[in-house]
Image: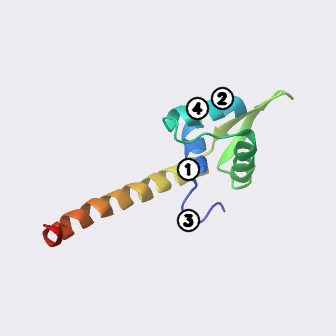
């Protein structure tokens, strides 16, 4: 089930912001806010990613009034978000360790 390998930034920020259930317009705004303006998402990208993540069972629709759907992260989505966060942290740790290990070669 689900994506194999790294997440896109869009996936990561959508899962992060869906810790608070939201509908599409709220999500676009929340992603922009959470990413400090680095990730700007249009409706096409948003709904494409939402469809994929719903198929992967990372998110679910918790409300549908016919006009708008409200999405929330699932336990699988939380696990995927934790795994991606751990992967990103490990990369940063590797970078720091590499800099320290090679510092004597560049000084």
Callouts 4 and 2 close, C-beta under 8 Å? yes
Disc ID at residue 5: 3
Closest to the observer: 72 or 41? 41
Q: CA distance from mark 3 to mark 4?
A: 25 Å
| Nearer the camera: disc 3 or disc 4 | 4
Q: Which residue is mark 1?
A: 9
Residue 28: x percent and y percent? 65, 34
The location of residue 8, given as percent across then percent down, is 58, 54
Q: Earlier in the sequence, mark 3 or mark 4?
A: 3
The crowd level at tag 4 (other Cα within 10 Å; few <14, some 14-19, many 20+) is: many
Secondary structure of the residue carrying tag 4 is helix
Mark 2 / mark 1, whichever is N-terminal: 1
Measure how far apart labels 3 and 2 are at the Cα level: 27 Å
**Does label 4 or label 1 sit earlier along the sequence?**
1
Report if residue 19 is visible in the image: no
Q: Position of residue 47 (x, y in %)?
A: 74, 44
Viewer-nearest residue: 93 or 104 = 104
Residue ID for mark 4: 30
Q: CA distance from mark 4 to mark 2?
A: 6 Å
Instruction: Assign a secondary structure to mark 2.
Output: helix
Residue picked out by circle 2:
26
């Amino acid at each position: 089930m689900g994506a194999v390998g790294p997440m896109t930034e869009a996936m990561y920020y959508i899962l992060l912001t869906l810790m608070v259930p939201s509908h599409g317009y709220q999500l676009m705004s929340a992603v922009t806010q959470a990413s400090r303006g680095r990730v700007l998402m249009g409706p096409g990208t948003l709904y494409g990613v939402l469809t994929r993540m719903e198929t992967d069972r990372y998110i679910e629709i918790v409300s549908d009034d016919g006009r708008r759907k409200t999405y929330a992260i699932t336990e699988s989505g939380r696990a995927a978000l934790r795994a991606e966060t751990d992967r990103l942290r490990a990369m940063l740790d590797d970078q720091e360790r590499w800099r320290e290990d090679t510092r004597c070669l560049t000084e």
